[in-house]
Amino acid sequence: MALRQLASRAARVVTTGVPSLAIKDQLAPACLRAGAARFYSSEVPSGFLFADSHEYAKIEGDIATLGITDFAQACGDVYAPLSGEVIEANSALVDDPSLVNTDPYAGGWMAKIKISDASEADALMDDAAYTKHVEASAH
């Protein structure tokens, strides 16, 4: 349900031109997987940047694709790792929200934003640093 709300809110901004969501703030309260937290698959893809709260950004020019990592497959709040204006919501999540769990780095992305402050990416971790962060969190 929360993912539907996120997709609807982001799509409304894209289609109506209503001023951007406060995307640096909370994207949506989300219960992204029922039950206990999922075990982490050790594959952290390269080419992404990661927040310590387990959101990711894949930056291409001034556009970032945002989502949650494979490690963050539990109930909780989802935050955007970068500031910007939502330009696209992943409408596929409306019909199949499980993509967030089953394909988090490709089909399960949540939103694309036009980045407003590229320097915020400097505070994010690359794949090697994020892998170490996850391993340390597991202990």
Image: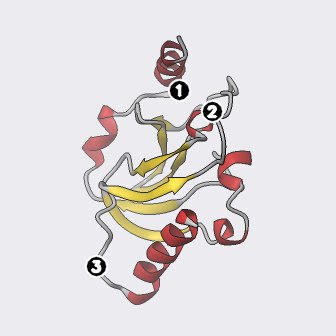
Give the labeled residue for mark 2: 45
Give the labeled residue for mark 3: 19
What amino acid is at disc 2?
Pro
Q: Are marks 1 and 2 in contact (CB under 8 Å)?
A: yes
Q: Earlier in the sequence, mark 3 or mark 1?
A: 3
CA separation in Å, label 3 and label 1: 33 Å
Residue 137 appears left or right of 46: left
Give the labeled residue for mark 1: 127
Label 3: few (<14), some or many (≥20) within 10 Å?
few
What amino acid is at disc 1?
Asp
Nearest to the observer: residue 71 or residue 37: 37
Can you say which quadrant of the picture contains the N terminus? bottom right
Q: Residue furthest front?
A: 35
What is the x, y in percent for residue 18?
A: 32, 84
Residue 34 appears left or right of 53: right
How many discs mark residues in the rendered view? 3
What amino acid is at disc 3?
Pro
